Image: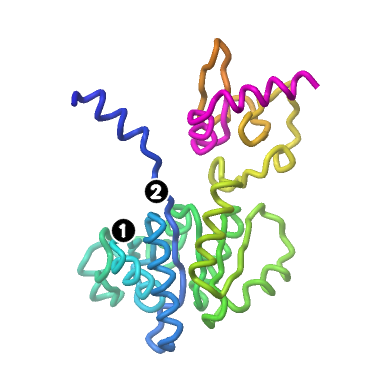
Amino acid sequence: MNEKQSIKSVSDDPMPLKIGVMGGAGSDIPAHYLDRAARLGEEIAAEGCVMITGACPGLPLAAAQGASKQGGTVIGISPALSLDEHAYKYGSPTLAHNVLIFTGSGLMGREVVNIHSSDIVVIVGGRSGTLGELAIAYDEGKLIGVLTGTGGISDMVQSILETCHKDTSARVIYNDDPQQLVNELLEVYRNEHFRRPSVFCRGVQAASPITIANGKKDIVCGMILEPGSAAARREQNGSEYVFCSLHCAEKFDAQPSNYLESEKSDSSL
């Protein structure tokens, strides 16, 4: 295989989704909460997703151990500058993580990297640090899952967000069963996916007030895109088609005739 073929094959593979697990890092967490966090990690790995944690003990570590048990990939975002600082200053684990990224940003700075690096964020238990991660994820329009019944803020998220009364385009899903929560999150992500950070794709209704006159439509999901904002483009029969995300472009690539026929039918109405 030559170099060009190798590069093409890598770029054609879909990038695995990254699910961030944010939760309580205390040492006094009940065993049944830890067990459910481990089950969450197992489900994330079983679905072929990469897990991101704050490289901390407690519930995120339990989830990392569950993912590792299933052969999953776990990336830890450390607040430290180095492995020594990670282990001795912060008392954080290396166990069950495939990769540690040292941000040198401290605990609060690390939270921003956690959220920005995750396609989906899951809240498990947690205290003030997890509350900060929830706030960042919610303000930035992320898809958020809450594993309810795990104590801490996870059982208060709904009332907190209702009190905030702020529409950020975030989507929040609650479930007390790890498998059901992961399945529902992936279903929503894959069908109402993000076209870029902080913008949740729900079709034309969720788009800003752009008209066909000055924007182009993604023929897969129906979203009207601002000029120059397309995540991907394809040429077919001399016409250019734009897409809000690689996900939509890949769906088009798989069955272009279906979408072209649908567009032709719509235009004839």
Badge 2 element: loop
Label 1 crowd bin: few (<14), some (14–19), many (20+), radius 10 Å:
many
Quarter containing the C terminus: top right
Residue pictured at 26% horizontal, 25% vertical? 5
In the displayed structure, would residue 41 be above or below residue 13?
A: below
Can you give x and y, in whole percent of width and height, for residue 184 in the image?
Answer: 56, 60
Quarter containing the N terminus: top left
Can you give x and y, in whole percent of width and height, for residue 3 in the image?
Answer: 21, 25
Q: CA distance from mark 1 to mark 2?
A: 10 Å
Using the rendered view, name the quadrant where residue 135 is placed. Answer: bottom right
Amino acid at the residue labelled 2:
Pro
Label 2 crowd bin: few (<14), some (14–19), many (20+), radius 10 Å:
few
Magenta span includes 118 = no
Q: Which residues are magenta?
A: 242-269
Q: Which residue is mark 2?
A: 16
In the displayed structure, would residue 102 be above or below residue 195?
A: below
In the displayed structure, would residue 127 be above or below residue 140?
A: below
Q: Which mark is residue 111?
A: none
Residue pictured at 28% horizontal, 29% vertical? 7
Badge 1 element: loop
Q: Is residue 34 left or right of residue 263?
A: left
Residue pictured at 39% horizontal, 43% vertical? 15
Using the rendered view, name the quadrant where residue 14 is placed. Answer: top left
Q: Which residue is mark 1?
A: 73
Magenta span includes 255 = yes
Using the rendered view, name the quadrant where residue 203 is placed. Answer: top right
Can you give x and y, in whole percent of width and height, for residue 46 in the image?
Answer: 38, 61
Residue pictured at 61% horizontal, 69% vertical? 174
